[in-house]
Image: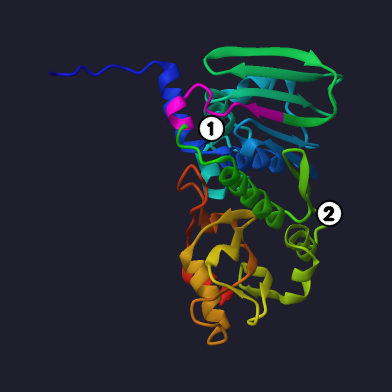
Amino acid sequence: MNRRITVLEEAVYKRIAAGEVVVNPAAVVKELMENSMDAGATAITVEISQGGKELIRVTDNGIGIVAEDVPLAIQKHATSKISTLDDLDKIGTLGFRGEALSSIAAVSRLMIQTRTADSPEGTVLSVSGEHGPEIISAGLAEGTTVKVENLFCNIPARMKFLKNTSRETVNVTSVVSKLIFANPHISIKYISNGKVVYHSPGNGNLKDAIVAVYGKDMAHKLAKTDHTFGEIHVHGLVSQPTFLYKSTNYMCFFLNGRYVQSKNLQSAVLRGYGERLLRGHYPFSILHIDLPLSRADVNVHPSKLQVMLYNETDVLDTIQ
C-alpha cells in the first residue's frame, strides 16, 4: 500500500522534537539550571521529587523575564541568548538554541514564575501539554522559578523508558554536582525528596565546591594545577597519584564554564601523570579550560556535551 506524505500536526512534531532535548529528568534539571546561570543568578535552589519524575523545581535570583517576553519563553527557537548567524561563532551562554522550555512544556505540566527588578509585579505562566498557556500577574520575589510536574505525562511510551526512581535520582545528582564544579561562584542548594543533599557556598573557591559534594576528606587528596599556553588557560584540581578510581567517571572537564565530555581530554590528563598511575586506575580531576569563544564549536548536538576544538592539539598539550 502506498502511503501519502502528510505534514504532521503541531502537537505531534512538538513532542517528537522534545525528545531530542528532554530525554530524562536530569536533562530538564541541566537545562533549567543553565538558564538560571545565563540569567546571572548567584543563588540557585534545585528541588526534585521521585527522581524528578514527579516534580522538578528550580529557583534563582537572576534577572528574571520581562512580562511581555514570558509567552515567548515557551515558543520554540525563541531565545535571548543569540540573535544573528554570526553569534553562533562566539557562543558565550550555556543555552542558546531556544528549545529547552518549549520542549519541557510539550511533555509536562510547566509553570514559570518570574519578576525583573524594575517591575512592580511578577508574571506566572502555566501550560500543560497541548493546552494553551495561561498567564496572570502576581506578587513575586525578583528572579525566576520554573516548576515541572509529571514529566512525560502525555507520552506514556517515553515514560516507560524512564529508569527507576533511584537511578533517575542518581542521574540528577550527577548533573547538579557537575554544575557546582562548573560554577563555584554560585551558591547551589540541591534538595531531593525534602532532604538537602548539597549546598555549595558560592564563594568562588573550587576546592570548597568539591568539598560541598564529596566531603572534607577530599580536600587533602587534591593538588592545584594551573597552566597557560598562548590563549589557552587550564586550571583546576587533580588527585594525587595515590588516590585513584577504577573508572573515568571522576574526570570532569569544563570548557568556558560548560561541562563537556571528551576521551581526548581524558587521555591528555593520563599522559600528564606519566607512569605514576596503576594500570586500570584513573585520577579524580576537575579541570577548567578557558579559551577564546571562536576557538570552539559547542553547536554540535542538542545535549551540548560534545564540542569541536580548533587546534585541539594545543589544548591537549596544555592539559598534559
Any mark on residue 201, and which?
2
Magenta stretch, residue numbers: 146-159
Q: Secondary structure at mark 2?
A: loop
Q: Is residue 186 left or right of residue 250?
A: right
Tell me: 50 left or right of 142. Answer: left
Residue occupying image coordinates x 84% and y 56%: 203
Q: Quadrant of residue 55?
A: top right
- Compare residues 264 and 197 and report the one nearer the observer: 197
As for residue 77 lying within the magenta part, the answer is no
Nearest the eye: 204 or 308: 204
- The amino acid type, in three-letter code, at marker 2 is Pro
Q: Nearer the viewer, residue 293 or 216?
A: 216
Residue that extends furthest to the left in the rendered view of this protein: 1
Looking at the image, residue 136 lies above or below residue 200: above
Q: Earlier in the sequence, mark 1 or mark 2?
A: 1
Tell me the distance, in whole angstroms, between the alpha carbons under discs 1 and 2: 31 Å
The amino acid beneath tag 1 is Glu
Identify the residue under disc 1: 99
The residue sitting at 80% across, 62% down in the picture is 208
* Position of the N terminus by quadrant: top left
Looking at the figure, which quarter contains the C terminus?
bottom right
Please tell me which residue lies in front, 56 or 14.
56
Q: Circles 1 and 2: CB distance less than 8 Å?
A: no
* Image quarter of residue 118: top right
Query: Percent position (x, y) of residue 26?
Result: 59, 42
Front: mark 1 or 2: 2
Query: In the image, 300: left or right of 244?
Result: left
Is 150 a magenta residue?
A: yes
Image spot of residue 5 (x, y percent): 24, 19
